[in-house]
Amino acid sequence: MIAAEHYSGARSWGLVQGAFAFGLLAGTVVCLRWRPYRLLAVAVLTGAGLCLPPAALGFGLALPWVLLATVLAGIGLGVAIVAWNTALQQHVPQEELGRMSSFNGVGERIAIPLGYLVTALAARAWADRAVLLVCAGAIVATTALNLCVRDVYRVNRT
């Protein structure tokens, strides 16, 4: 709805999706050179970049700013994925890795549809921009809460 009403519709949304894909690729390339020490903290913190596109859309920024926010979100998610998978591989014993990966996958597959459901319900009650800003705020809040967990800083690169 936002893309159709405030940007040029499908063309703009195609550019946003391309910007995200570019960011994911760039984040992966960053990880070829950068080897962070605190893997889990980096994964949590860089994943917070996902708040940028909904915030940019929610504030009604011009398309170039939305594209920049989306590229940065992609970079952050690319780094987060690599850091998380590295932590998983280095800190979970080989005989438990399959089970741990399965739990992780189930958690992701439950959280995503649940998030879509809550967002759809919120969209019925609030304006589009308000929903986007609340989603951005929720990402920031959950990141802050995760960074309060002491063990996040104990999972380091080996």
Image: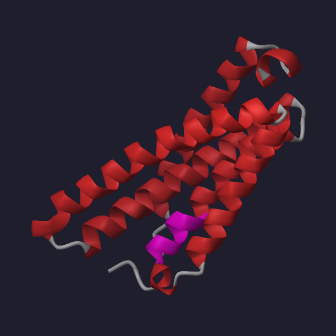
Which residue lies at the image location 59% right of the left edge and 81% below the top edge? 148
Colour scheme employed for the rendering of this structure: secondary structure
Residue 39 magenta: yes
Q: Quadrant of residue 81?
A: bottom left
Does residue 152 appear left or right of residue 7 in this picture? left
Residue at the spot 73% in from the left edge and 41% down from the top edge:
53
Report the front residue among 29 and 20: 20
Name the main secondary structure of what is drawn in magenta.
helix
Q: Is residue 108 left or right of residue 10?
A: left
> Which residue is drawn at the image coordinates 35% and 60% (left, top)?
85
Q: Position of residue 12 (x, y in %)?
A: 75, 19
User: In the picture, which quadrant includes the C terminus?
Assistant: bottom left
Please say if 152 is above or below 20. Answer: below
45 vs 86, nearest the viewer: 45
Q: Position of residue 150 (x, y in %)?
A: 51, 86
Relative to residue 99, is residue 128 depicted above or below?
above
Q: On screen, 64 above or below 102?
A: above
Which residues, given as a range, are shown in magenta?
Answer: 37-45
Please state which of residues 106 and 18 is positioned toward the viewer in this rendering: 106
Q: Give the quarter of the figure containing the N terminus.
A: top right
Residue at the (50%, 64%) spot, across then down: 43
The residue furthest left is 95
From this viewpoint, is residue 7 visible?
yes
Residue 31 % position (x, y): 47, 58
User: Residue 30 location in percent, x, y?
Assistant: 53, 55
Determine if residue 22 is in view: no
